[in-house]
Image (cartoon, rainbow, N blue to C red):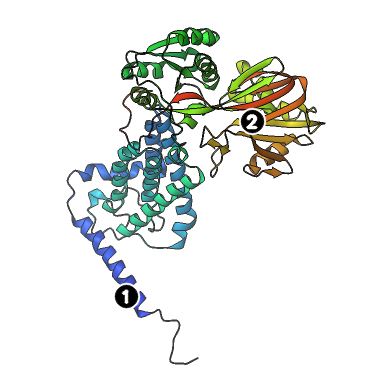
Amino acid sequence: MSPDVDLTVPRPGRTAVSAWLLDLDRRLFESAAESHWPGAQRILPRLSRSANHGVLWCATAAAVAASRTPRARRAAVRGIASLGLASLAINTIGKRSVRRPRPLLDPVPLVRRLNRQPITTSFPSGHAASAAAFAAGVALESPAWGAAVAPLAFSVAVSRVYTGVHFPSDVLAGAALGAGAAFAVRGLVPTRAQLTPPARPRAEVPALPEGDGLVLVANAGASTADRVRALRDALPQADVVMCEPADIEEELAKAAARARVLGVCGGDGTVNAAATAALRHGLPLAVLPGGTLNHFAYDLGVEDVRDLAGAVRRGEAVRVDVGRFTAGERAGIFLNTLSLGVYPELVRERDRWSHRIGGWPAGLLAAVRVLRADRHPVTAEIGGRSRPLWLVFAGNCLYHRRGLASGRRLDLADGLLDVRVVPGGRLPALRLLTAALAGPLTRSSAHAAVKAGRLRLGGVMPGTLLAYDGEVTEARGGLTVEKLPQALAVYRPARRRRSSRPPTSSI
């Protein structure tokens, strides 16, 4: 090696560029400090302090979620999750990787300065990262709420330069990191827009501009009053019938006899009863989600009154598959899932205790009791042999998982049953967890999955519980499950709304 070459000296070009950027950053900071910002003196320092420890963003998330729309609640949760990931990255990597001192406060007017100066390193700005992460996370789920939150996030980021605690480059780097955190969260848990099912096959249904001809039955036990009130405003000529859960089937039969379009507002069990009536009378179905989970409506792409009312006015609908089962003398349909084994046992145990100790404690107690039981909940004949099983699951159309999100159906008319079987054995909790993690795998030691148009189980023991769309009954003798392809016409908007103003009424 030549003694004339000193490898410890940085390359001049790189040093010159770095020095120029740092000098530009300093001059921008000083320019901002010397500038007069009308009205900012009273607002920005307070806004900067309110964002300490994420307090401002938690309050904003609560305000967004208070609108009570599913999209707003998801946007609020996504914003907080993005903020959490950004804060973790800032505190574990960002602040430790670049130990940059804070700006000198000499050029900053005393009235602008924060009472308590931060003691951490300057690069990158944690406040800017949190603001950008929250705003971007909200916008990825709901562009309308994202637009409402963006000015607040921008003001917080600017306030860090205004109060003299960060250089402009600190804020830009923090904002970039925060936005990256929001996109990382979306990669782990996709937004609804990423999971929208295809708008096909189209169905010919009547367009009802004012709702005349729509008879909608609402389950009064499912907290549907706000949604029904909003529907009456959107479709003033619609006939809305509120009834108690025990009267649902009777009221649906009456409504189907006089309706051009049968509507329903309630949970998945109520929607199942409405679908049965619609099939019997050859009517299209309009579904307004009104329960706790609303799997069918959300997989369909209908989330609120605006989705449904727009589709009814324009006559937009698709045809969807229906699952049908026969278990001895018992027959019925399902729009979501059918299962035997652990899940029906859990539902029965939960219902037994929920009125005494509440829903969540009852669910936990039910899981402990069922998974510690010595007996297998299902015994059935498979391939001519009687086998113990922990779970038999049949989904109406294929369920897909993206990232950490729970399974969603991307096509409600694929003509297939998504069949999953967890064989019996020891350690049921471990087997079920392994099966859940196996997810898309077609086969594993604890899980088997097949795509089929028909399923038949023989030798099902008397008293075996069967759950379909949240309802529980007994399966006797053999069980047959099959598909009714494209059997039901259901209203849904042809195009999902890409943006809309934040809702002004509770729906």
Q: Quick one: label 1, few (<14), some, or many (20+) residues within 10 Å?
A: few
Q: Residue 362: in sight, yes or no?
A: no
Name the one closer to the observer, 183 or 207: 207
Distance CA(mark 1)–CA(mark 2): 66 Å
Amino acid under label 2? Ala
Total numbered badges shown on the rendered structure: 2
Q: Which residue is mark 1?
A: 16
Q: Is residue 58 left or right of residue 320?
A: left
Name the one closer to the observer, 354 or 447: 447
Q: Which residue is mark 2?
A: 394
Q: Position of residue 53 (x, y in %)?
A: 42, 44
Q: Quick one: label 2, few (<14), some, or many (20+) residues within 10 Å?
A: many
Whether 453 is drawn above or below 478: the answer is below
Q: Is residue 196 left or right of residue 398?
A: left
Indicate the quadrant containing the C terminus: top left, top right, bottom left or bottom right: top left
In the image, farthest residue toward the front: 204
